Image: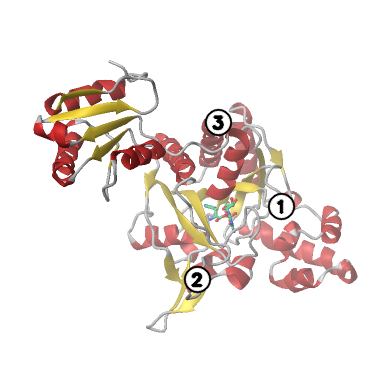
Amino acid sequence: MPKRIQSIRGMHDILPAQTPAWQQLEATMRNVVTGYGYQEIRLPVVEFTELFARSIGEVTDIVEKEMYSFEDRNGDSLALRPEGTAGCVRAGIEHGLLHNQQQRLWYSGPMFRHERPQRGRYRQFYQVGVETFGIEGADIDAELILMSARLWRRLGLSNLRLEINTLGSIHARKVYRERLIDYLLAHEDQLDEDTKRRLHSNPMRVLDSKNPEIQAIIARAPSLLDALDPEPAAHFAQLKVLLDHAGIEYRVNPRLVRGLDYYTRTVFEWVSDELGAQSAVCAGGRYDGLVEQLGGRPTPAAGFAIGLERTLDLIEAHKGTPQPVAPQVYLAMIGQPAACAGQALAERLRDEVSDLSMLVNCAGGSLKAQLKRADRSGAEIALILGEDELAKDAITIKYLRKEWDQKTIVQAALAPFLKTALATPDGHQ
Ligand code: HAM
């Protein structure tokens, strides 16, 4: 037997039993973001590697270790997108969507990171993201947070906690960076290899180290909040006022720095204690410098992205998996002439009964075998077209889920029958 080919580690099939939960989640998300006036943008999965290096940052885990980058047949260095913000900014600049305009955009789709797979962490995972451009006040930061809070309410998730922080201006970050390097150098003998490597290249990332010994050192490190310039400090204060006003609970976490370099000012994460080590379900913030950094005019910007696998994990823990959607009707046909006439009848029914969901028996079989398939499909009603029915232009109707005598009616009466039967909750008429 030839060797079976398997899916790639960390990249999962989403099977029919799971897709109803995905569809419900995606529909709810689409509904919420559209309700806030966000418009969908669809972006390529592959971009030039340089786009991610220049936006996410050369010295980040994502770019250094996790990108699926490769040379294509033209010798260009391309990468599977590890996230959606960079591509969205690229598209906004390329198509003139950003200059002197306000934009509220959303996207969804797969992202790729070569991380070590574990619960909640995959190499292909799905995000729904939103990005706003041209709005600089804290009001848009608050809108993003309120919109995500509404989404959790719609999904029935009540155990998510909001953490917020400000990274200040680029200037304040520079000042703080020096202070932090000095502090870490004073403890150099206690630092692990990773931290030593990051010390000069990207010391801010040391702040969210997962190593407990490093965390203990960081706990006594100077805080970025003490280095803030007045304007970003006022912006952050205003955000807190807006959140208080809206009754949104949050915790200011001065160690929240995020793993991507493009952030300025507000950053936030929604976290859960129920997800193990991968606790962030949704994360985002402002990135006021990125549009300019990628060749556009200076444009304030902010957004977030939600991880769909982690969100589904939480929904399942609270509400279980939704049932797959069964067809309403199964059409069984006995004999070749009936099989021919049956497909034509099914097409007429699909024209006449809107939203009808019907499985048409294929590959023949005895009546018993066909009714068994009908039962397994979960359909409410079986329609039987045999020789007798065919001769009389009739059809037999059989309820599969309840005690009910079957009856034969003329085919002309079938569409009105189905409309009523499928509209009334108990199906009888
Ligand atoms: P991020 O924090 O890298 O931010 O990812 C956002 C969310 O995607 C995470 O909170 C998590 O739920 C999910 N996620 C990330 N990596 C994985 C993985 N390997 N497996 C499963 N889920 C994962 C961004 O991507 C930014 N682009 C967010 C943003 C948009 N900031 C501004 N606008």
Proximity of marks 3 and 2: CB atoms separated by less than 8 Å:
no
Of residues 358 and 237, the one nearer the viewer is 358
Say what amino acid the circle numbered 2 marks: Arg
Mark 3: few, some, or many residues within 10 Å (few <14, many ≥20)? few
The answer to which of marks 3 and 1 sits earlier in the sequence is 3
Mark 2 or mark 1: name the one nearer the start of the chain: 2
Residue 206 located left or right of residue 397:
right
Which residue has dot 1 on it?
Answer: 277
Separation of residues labelled 3 and 1 (CA atoms): 24 Å
Q: Residues within 10 Å of mark 2 (few under 14, many from 20)?
A: few
Compute the Cα span from label 3 to label 2.
44 Å
Mark nearer the viewer, 3 or 1: 1
Residue 58 visible to an observer of this rendering: no
Mark 2 within 8 Å of ligand 1, using the beta carbon:
no
- Three-letter amino acid code at disc 3? Arg
Q: Earlier in the sequence, mark 3 or mark 2?
A: 2
Mark 3 and mark 1 in contact? Answer it, CB < 8 Å.
no
Q: Label 1: how many residues lie within 10 Å, few (<14), some (14-19) or many (20+)?
A: few
User: Residue 106: percent from the left, percent from the top?
Assistant: 42, 48
The residue pinned by badge 3 equals: 153
